[in-house]
Image (cartoon, rainbow, N blue to C red):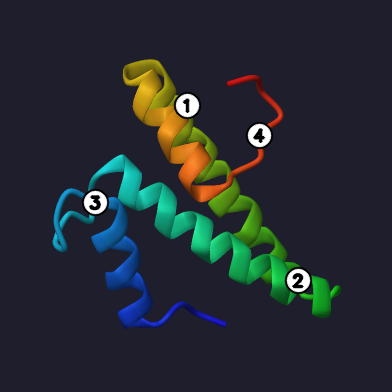
Amino acid sequence: MAISKKEKEEIIKQNGSSAKDTGSVNSQVALLTAEITDLTNHVKVNKKDYATKRSLYRKVSRRRSLLTYLKKNDLDEYRALVKKLGIRLSETI
């Protein structure tokens, strides 16, 4: 259910400025997106797993906050990241 260490390193390498860039907004959003996808698949199978559903909501909320921050500070980077990750948002871009 959890993302492996190699998968995390690969996600950070693809979205951060370097392999060790874990703090940038881009790498955090990409990592949260991968975790959200994984948890969504788990919740679809295990409908009564309320603890996992709660953690999914927390991750979605955290990703939304980071995307709002990125949108306010660098709109072009925000648009590129949303397009790259394939995030479907209810807001207009």
Circle on res. 43? 2
What residue is at 58 percent from the left and 21 percent from the top? 93
Give the percent coordinates (x, y) of residue 25: 32, 41
In this rendering, does residue 46 appear at all?
A: no
User: Separation of disc 2 and disc 4 at Cα?
Assistant: 20 Å
Judge from the rendering whether residue 35 lies leftward or rightward of residue 75; answer left or right.
right
x%, y% of residue 79? 46, 29
Q: Nearer the viewer, mark 2 or mark 3?
A: 3
Ranked by sequence position, the earlier of labels 2 and 3 is 3
Q: Earlier in the sequence, mark 1 or mark 2?
A: 2
Which amino acid does the dot numbered 3 rest on? Gly
Which one is earlier in the sequence, the residue at label 3 or at label 4? 3
> Which numbered tag is attached to residue 89?
4
Determine contact: label 1, label 2, CB under 8 Å.
no
Marks 2 & 4, CB-CB < 8 Å contact? no
Q: Earlier in the sequence, mark 2 or mark 4?
A: 2
Quarter of the rendering occupied by the N terminus: bottom right
Q: Do the CB atoms of the residues marked 4 and 1 lie less than 8 Å apart?
A: no
- Helix, strand or loop for disc 3: loop
Q: CA distance from mark 2 to mark 3?
A: 29 Å
Number of numbered discs present? 4
Residue ID for mark 3? 16
Of the residues shown, which amino acid type is indicated by label 2? Val
Q: Depth-wise, is mark 4 or mark 1 nearer the camera? A: 4
Closer to the observer: label 2 or label 4? 4
Tag on residue 68? Answer: 1
